Amino acid sequence: MKYLMQSIALLLFFPFVNNAQENNYTKAKELVSKMTLDEKINLVVGMGMKMGAMNMPGGAPNVGQTMDKVPGAAGTTFALPQLGLPTTVVADGPAGLRIEPKRVNDANTYYATAWPVATLLASTWDVKLVEQVGKAMGNEVKEYGVDVILGPGMNIMRNPLGARNFEYYSEDPLVTGKIATAMVNGIQWNGVGTSVKHFAVNNQETNRNSVDAIVSERALREIYLRGFELVVKEAKPWTVMSSYNLLNGTYTSQSYDLLTTVLRKDWGFKGMVMTDWFGGKDAVAQMKAGNDLLMPGTPQKRKAITDAINNKTLDVKVLDENATRIVAYILETPAFKKYAFSNKPDLKQHAVLAREAAANGMVLLKNNNTALPIIAAKNIAAFGNTSYDFISGGTGSGDVNEEYTISLVEGLQNAGYTVDAELKTIYSAYLYDYKAKHPKKSFIEEFVNPTPNASELLLNNAIISSKAASSDMAVITIGRNAGEGKDRVVLNDFNLSKAEQQLIDEVSTAFHAKGKKVVVIINAGGVIEVASWRDKVDAVLLAWQPGLEAGNAVADVLSGKVNPSGKLAVTFPVKYEDEITAKNFPGKEFKEKAVTGFMGQKEIPAEVTHEEGVYVGYRYYNTFNVKPAYEFGYGLSYTNFDYKNVKLSSSTFKGKLVITLEVTNTGTVAGKEVVQLYIAAPTNKLDKPNEELKAFAKTDLLQPGQTQTLQFVIDAKLLASFHTAASAWVADAGTYTVKLGTSSLAIKQTATFTLAKEILVEKVNKVLVPTVTINELKK
Ligand code: BGC
């Protein structure tokens, strides 16, 4: 009786404790019990993109159905109309909904908003703003008839050359987890789903389908899995996408330890897992691992599952469970609920939000003698190819088909500046000619053989000098693009090309000779080298890849309409070799074992050993005193902030600690500040980074003189490290130092508290143990 009353009370007070899919589970189970074997197999083997050359040998995996509902979507689930289950549509990707903008015999267009890339969104450190972006992105998903967007991407930016870093948030798991939580909450608020990806340790594109990431249990739990853990627990994404790579010897999509033991048992995930497209090798192992949906589904996988059921190497109960989770998902979708989508999301309104988000995530790296905001200059000379062909987002599946991208020069003109006409003519003609010689290729052709960017146009000195005389200032844009399939390289990519260096040299010399300022805009999805050239220019604005309103958002910051408040969520090293992961990226290849793999491409077995352990990003730079060019958390403002009166709810930790801090705008213009709370934990039991980010908060827009009190809540899990031998999160006894900073190196206030007795916060299953010894870095 007592228990009954307790259960009733629980139901009354926590009607939403379970997520929707969990509630659908019973109904889903009943539907699966009515299915034939074929129907169940049709369900777990999804349907893929229709991509000409990529049509599967042996025909479509699921015969008799097409996936034409939303052209350009990445795939669908199989419909079982006899059971009332419609087809559901999944489409990329992190920076906005990726669908075809035009359809055959249809005058309407289906453009979607290219939002600022994930890296920029994380640089806002503004969970409210990111949630708003998520709400608007999810609205496009819903109004275009899609059920799940294949994002957000949440792998850790382990190394600056990772091609997909623009799709990811940060080198830090807390930023990753918190920003992803805001994004998933925003998107799913619409009643559509997300697929957080790529689970897990997919930190490189080189050999992505064959590389074995060898990682210690501790680095996994603290760094590579932690962001996913946060999002699963705090936002309940409908689906998770397993990654392409192997992890400690097993393909992630075939790993029961990862997809069932960790994801479901340790973390309580109730949703569905799908593979990345064509990911993994063994369909039966995938089923057993709890990878419910195989995308985009191939006839071979279909056959493998059928055979395994027939010869009893796969228990039909396993298949039933996979199918049940897929049906539970389907029951939650707009497709099942027969939502009458409009195909008319409010793109104009979304563009306004995209511009706001973009301006709030740009990072002012340098601003000598208040070169910015632009006060008096009216005539601007814009240099660099990318000023005229601004990059809204990265390539591959993370690209969006937006209607337009506002270039830097258009943005400057829209803001009322005069942009030098002769330069515009010269650059436009050069880029026009380059594009004519490099016509747009299909997605697949581009994937296999990416078109190189036009090399930086070399201008003669006479032109540069004449512009230094006739213009009030110079802006130079340095552009970079990357995307899935091919990691970046150091030469002419991470490092500037000779032509770019020459451009910066010549423009700076000419303009400075006339007492005029030079501003560099970095238009990239990831990190580049800055230390060798930044002293030559007056200001550097990191605009990232800011989505379709790019130029307008850059102009907002340059003009001072928006005071920059973005901070780096990734370290900018002085040189690539300073990066501790450089010696283990992209790992070792075993060329002699190469086989023919996906789309006829050579598949080379490889391994990448994470010898740096937990010392990724600032955890490495700060602990080992390697000075970066710009540290994690760094970013300038047009105003200044003062931090005072840090208060702790107690000087001893008793399960929870509340920390408050007063932040005052001491400058002359309104601005927002991102306050970062780092903690240095006792190291008597375990080697630990000097400090780790444990919380952050962004102020409102503070007027000059205005003060805001920020509050941070620290629980025991935030104090804990992963103790491998105990397979547990443990908060060690001792003294903890709270460091409140405007970056990870600019700490403005500190305070200490003690923990009298160690806390065993959480014991987890001992799984994903590396099979080889890793020579891990220690302090
Ligand atoms: C990418 C995924 C993407 C999928 C579907 C894969 O190549 O790795 O991120 O969601 O394609 O387009």
Image: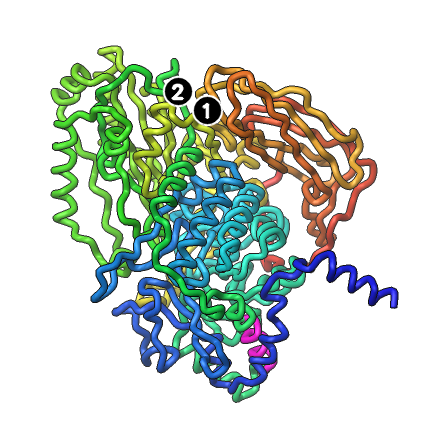
Q: Is residue 700 visible?
A: yes
Image height check: is 528 above or below 226?
Answer: above
When asked about the image quadrant of residue 101, the answer is bottom left
Q: Quadrant of the N terminus?
A: bottom right
Residue 285 in the image, given as x and y percentages of width and height: 53, 73
Q: Is residue 596 visible?
A: no
Amino acid type at image mark 2: Asn
Say above or below: 665 vs 263: above
The label number, if any, that marks residue 636 in the structure image: 1
| The one of 512 and 381 positioned closer to us in this rendering | 381
Quarter of the picture containing the C terminus is top right
Relative to residue 388, is residue 328 drawn left or right? right
Q: In this rendering, is residue 569 above or below 375?
A: below
User: Farthest residue toward the right?
Assistant: 1
Question: Residue 31, position in %: x, y?
Answer: 56, 80
Residue depicted at x 57% and y 29%? 675
Label 1 sits on a secondary structure element that is loop
Residue lying at 84% horizontally and 65% vertically, measured from the top left? 3
Tell whether label 1 touches label 2 (CB within 8 Å): yes
Q: Magenta residues?
A: 316-325
The residue carrying mark 2 is 367
Q: Amino acid at mark 1?
A: Leu
